[in-house]
Amino acid sequence: MEFKAQSIADFLGGTVEGDANVTVSDVAKIEEGKPGTLAFLSNAKYNRYLYETEASIVIVNMDMELEAEVKATLIRVPDAYKAFASLLELVQQAKVNKTGIENPSFIDVTATLGKDLYIGAFAYIGKNVCIGNHVKIYPQVYIGDNTTIGDDSILFAGTKIYEDSKIGKACIIHAGAVIGSDGFGFAPTEDGTYKKIPQIGNVILEDWVEIGANTTIDRATMGSTIIRKGTKIDNLVQIAHNVEIGENTVMAALTGISGSTKIGKNCRFGGQVGVAGHLTIGDNVNLGAMSGVSNNIKSDKTVLLAPAMDIAQAVKVAVVYRNLPQLREQVLDLVKQVAELKIKLEE
């Protein structure tokens, strides 16, 4: 599918500088642009590529001043990054715009289906499932009994939704994610073995939540594990039973949240963050990559390292850590001097 520069500018509310009739059929990074592709420039670090790129169209900020002649047609917009993101969203919607029910697939007679659905081959939809309008269910998705899925949600291939889960509107769940598996609950017995504690709760994903590939969110022991609206969770994240995550929080890959921890809204977690169980993390908290959290954190804090500490203290610790080899040599030298003084005093 091809788009003219003028059509793109009209969609973005921008202005064309160059050939308004030039067409593109693909997108590319500005440094890798080729004829027929669309690129964008929002970071000054890449400015030099604007004058080298072979891309046919480049989206730039309205206030960008040119330093030399540009071969590409420019589309000027208030914010190039946001504009390009809007275009990518449009392309993505076109790619996933499937409808119809493929065979073989299983849909229980008690399930309620909305309109304009896509249900891929080998999907399984259990008893009393309620699916909203415009939902996309890709091949090999499993949806357990009594599950609810809101309008415009997308479940990519191989997603597993256990029974009693509630998925809100416009949620995206990527391939291999598991929603509602048993929480990790075992009681030690006198003979050293462990007795499994039944997990009879569920998982609730509110509206506009996105779950990455191969992420797992465990059902609650009782009650619900809750992911509040607007939260975005990366690939390979583990959310344990009875956890609650506040609105618009983001978590990078390989993060692990232990059971019954409550996380506030608008928090940001770097990769490989680990949070112990039964803690409270306030609103607007930033956790640096590989932070290890074992205590409650108040709102509006930025913490780093393991064990996690306030950023000001973490910076001091990092300085000392970098100097450890030098400090070790100094300590060994002092030990040697003390031993020599001791010998002299004993003579």
Image: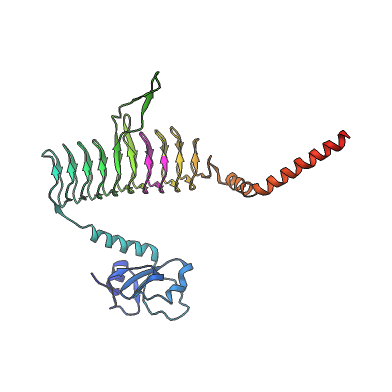
Q: Residue furthest right?
A: 347
Q: Is residue 308 left or right of residue 61?
A: right
Q: Is residue 8 left or right of residue 116?
A: right
- Prevalent SS, magenta region: loop
| Residue 298 visible, this orientation | no
Task: Depth check: give the residue in front, 223 or 338.
Answer: 338
Q: Percent x, y for residue 7?
A: 27, 72
| Residue 292 visible, this orientation | yes
Q: In which quadrant will I find the N terminus?
A: bottom left
| Residue 250 covered by magenta stretch | yes
Instruction: Tell me the residue at 21%/58% (across/down).
Output: 97
Q: Percent x, y for residue 211?
A: 33, 47
Q: Quadrant of residue 21?
A: bottom left
Q: Residue furthest left?
A: 109
Instruction: Tell me the residue at 30%/36% (across/down).
Output: 181
Task: Depth check: give the residue in front, 214 or 328.
Answer: 328
Q: Residue furthest top?
A: 190
- Against 296, residue 13 (above or below) is below
Instruction: Tell me the residue at 27%/62% (across/down).
Output: 91
Task: Depth check: give the residue in front, 312 or 212.
Answer: 212
- Against 293, residue 86 (above or below) is below
Q: Residue furthest bottom?
A: 69
| Residue 45 covered by magenta stretch | no
Q: How many marks?
A: 0
Q: Percent x, y for residue 202?
A: 29, 34
Q: Percent x, y for residue 281?
A: 45, 39
Range shown magenta: 233-256
- Against 161, residue 15 (above or below) is below
Q: In which quadrant will I find the C terminus?
A: top right
